[in-house]
Amino acid sequence: MIENLVIVESPAKAKTIERFLGENYVVKSSFGHIRDLEKKDLGIDIEHNFQPKYEISPDKKAIVKELKQLAKEAKTVWLASDEDREGEAIAWHLFEVLGLKKENTKRIVFHEITKDAILHAINNPRDIDKNLVDAQQARRVLDRLVGFEVSPVLWKKVKPSLSAGRVQSVAVKLIVEREREINHFVEQKYYKVTGTFETKDANGNAVPLKAELSERFSTKEETVAFMEYCKGTTFTVSNVETKPSSRKPAPPFTTSTLQQEASRKLGFSVSQTMTVAQKLYEQGHITYMRTDSVNLSQLAIGAAKAVICNTLGEKYSKPRNFATKTKGAQEAHEAIRPTYMDKESVSSDKNEQQLYALIRKRTLASQMADAELEKTTITIAIAGKQYTFEAVGEVIIFDGFLKVYIESQDDEKEDDEAALLPAIHKGDHLQRSLIQALEQYTTHLPRYTEASLVKKMEALGIGRPSTYAPTITTIQNRGYILRESRDGVERELDQIDLKGQDLKVKKIKRIFGAEKKKLFPSDIGMVVTDFLSNYFTNIMDYNFTANAEDALDHIAEGEVEWQSMIGTFYQPFHANVEKTLKESERNTGARVLGTDPQTGENVSVRIGRFGPMAQIGEGENVRYAGLLKGQLMETISLEEALELFKFPRQLGEFEEKPVSVGIGRFGPYIKHNQLFVSLKKGVDDPGTITLETAIERINEKREIEKNRKIKEFDNGVQILNGRFGPYITFNKENYKIPKGQEADKLTFEETMAIIAKGGSSKKKTTKKTTKKTTEKTDEKTTVKTTKKGTKKETKKKE
C-alpha cells in the first residue's frame, strides 16, 4: 500500500521534490499532458456544443497504465502540476483518466520548488479549478478550429502543406508589415558635423572637448561652405547647464522581459531561454518562469534586503513593490526570482549559470537604491551663426543599483554613452582643434529580433507568457520567417576635415545595413499573410487576437461560459471559410517583372511547388530558376531574375568529370560526380567562382566526410561523428552511445545491442524531453489523399 502518490508533469521536477518529502511519498511524472484532442478528424463535436473528443497519446499509454496502478494502491493522490491553465488542465485530465476519487485526491500548487513551499502546499490543498481548465479547453478548441478549417483553404488557394494559426499568423503579419515599411523607406543623405575644441585644466594643460553641431546639412556644398566659414570665426561657451537626475531600477523579470534581456545580454533565442529557465525551475533554483507579474513576496523582499545590506551596505538597500501594467496580465505568480537570494551560482552548465546570474542580479537591483547622477550640457556659440555645438556629459554621484545591474536596450548604439566633460565656464573662448563632417544616411526602422517581437506581441496583448516561445519557434520551423544575420553593403562616403586652415575632402568606406540575428519574412510568409488578411480579416486583426485572450481570461475567472464564447466565434468564422473556398482566387504571389531580351517572353516570379521561383515564358518552353537566399519576390528586379537563368554554370572538369555551379532550393552549390557541395557563405559567389576554388571545396567536403565516418558494418549500420559527439545511425534512426563506451572500439554485437534497446534514439529523446516546454501552440493540419477522397488529420505542433 502506498501512503501518498504525488504526480507532477516533469521527471526533473519529480526528482527535486523527492528530496524534500519523506519515505511516505512516491513522486511520479506524467511527462506533460497524457491526452489531447483526437487526431482523427476534427476532435471536436461541433453539433453537441463543441464537446472535445480526447484520446490518450500513444506514447503515454504505458505511463497511464503505471499511474493507474499506483493510484489504486495509494491512500492519497496529490496532483502537483503547475499553477497555470495548462497545469490545471493536466491535473484535470489525470483526475479523469486515472479514475481518481474526490475524497482521496488533493490538488496542490507552488511557484517555487523549495521544501517550505512544498510543505506549505501540502498543508493547504485545494480542489481542481474548473474555470482554469475551461479556459485551457477553450484555447485548445479555438486553436484547433482555426488551424483545421483555415489550413485546407491555404492548401487549395496558395500551396499544399501550409498551415494557419490564431496567434502564429498575426505574429508573421507583424514581421511582414515591418519588412514592407523597410522596403518602402526612402533614405535621405545628410552630413553630421562634430567639433573637437581645446580648453585648459587647472594646471594649464590642454584638454579636448568634443561636441556635435545642432544642424545637419543635406548637401556637400552646404557642408563645405559652413566649414569654410569656421576657418575665420570664434567659438565661445554660451551656456553651461548642470542638472541633478536619478535613475530607477527596472522591475524583476517577467517571462517577456527575461526573454528580451537574455537575447540582448546572452544572445539566447527565446526558446533557448525558456528551456534553460525550465531546468533552473525544476532544480529548485528559481521561481516559476511563466509569469507576467512583477510582484515579489515580502519574504523575497526581505531576503534581498539582507543580501544587499550584508554585501554592499545599508545605503544601497531600498525595498520596493512593483505594479504589473502588462495588457491582460494574468496568472497570480511572483516575478521570476531566485528561490534563495544568497545563492550566487548554480550548476556547472554554462547557460544555466549565465541565466541564473542574470535573474539574480536583476532581482537584487530591483530592491536597491536609485542611482544619483549629474548631467551637464555645454553649449558652444559660433560667432555670426545661429547654429551651436553641444556637448553632453553625465557623472555618477552615487551608483546605487547600477553597481549590480544595467538594463540593455534594443539596437543600442556605441555613441549613446555620455562623455566625461572637462571643467569649463560660461564665456570661455575655445580653440578649434578639428571640425569634421561625415556623410551619413537615415536608417529605416529596425527589423524585429525575437526579443523585440515578444515585446511587441506583449504590448498588443497577443499571446501570453507560455505562448511567446512556441509561437516564434513554430513560425520559423514552418518557413514563414527566417532568423538570420546578413552582411551589410560597403559604401563610399565623404569625410571633410578642417584642421587649422587646411580643408580636406577624402573618401572612406563604411558598412551599411548589416543585420545580426534578425527576423525576415519569407516569400511564402508574405503571400500567406496577404491571403489571410484579404479573406480572414477577423483572425488577422490584432485586436481580435488580443480580445480572444481577454475572453479566455474571463473564462478563467468564471465570468464567461467557454462553449458560448466558442459558439459566438465559430458560426461567422465557418461561414467565411465556406465563402472563401468558393469565391477566392488562387494566390501564388505572381508578379511580372518584364520581358526577356533574348526570347521576348515574360519574366515573372511566383510561389511554386518547391518554393519561390522565377519563370520565363509559358507552356512547353517555360524555364524555371529558384530564387537566391535573401531575394524576395516582392523586391527582386528583372535584371536579378535574369541572372538566375545563367545557372548551372559549367566550370570545367575534375577527375574526368564535369564540375558545375547551380542554385537550388537551399542556395548555391557545386556539383561533381553526384557530390553536392554548398558554397561558403560570404566568401564564394556562384557567378564568379573558379574551377580551382570549386576543386578546393570538393576536397574539403571529402575530408569532412572521411573524418565523419568512424565505422561501418556490412548491414548498413554506421558510427559517425556528429555535432554533439559520436552516434550510431541505422535505417534513418539515430542512437546515442551510452556513457563509458568508446565509439571506435564498439563491436558489431555491441552496436546492435544499443540499437535493440531503442530508448536512445535521438528523435525519441527529443520528443520526450520537450513535451512540457512546448505547450500552448496553434494547430498544424495535414492532409492525406486516398482513392476514396480526402482524409483530414490534425496534428498538435511541437
Image (cartoon, helix red, strand yellow):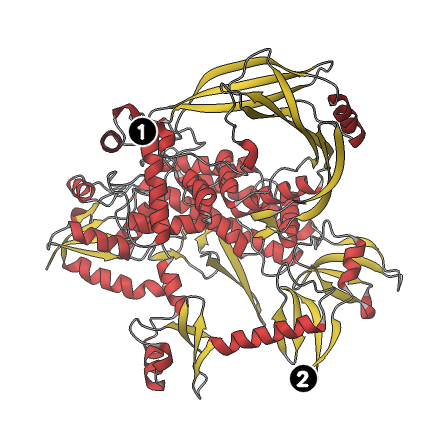
Q: Which mark is residue 325?
A: none
Image position of 384 with respect to 60: above or below: above
Tell me the distance, in whole angstroms, between the alpha carbons under discs 2 and 1: 70 Å
409 up-or-down from 6: above or below: above
Q: Quadrant of the N terminus?
A: bottom left
Mark 1 residue type: Gln
Picture coordinates of residue 777, whole percent (x, y): 45, 50
Foreground residue, 454 or 644?
644
Query: Which residue is depicted at the point 64% across and 54% down?
Result: 524
Q: Name the side, left or right, on which 702 lies relative to 348.
A: right
Q: Residue 655, which numbered label?
A: 2
Type of amino acid under label 2: Glu
Residue 318 visible to an observer of this rendering: no
> On the rendered structure, is 1 left or right of 323?
left
Circles 2 and 1: CB atoms closer than 8 Å: no
Q: Which residue lies most toward the front here?
A: 204
- Measured as percent of width and height from the top left, residue 595 is found at 86, 57
Does residue 95 appear left or right of residue 33 in this picture?
left
Dot 2: element: loop
Q: Which mark is residue 367?
A: 1
Q: Position of residue 194 (x, y in %)?
A: 65, 28
Residue at far bottom of view: 714
Corner quadrant of residue 537:
top right
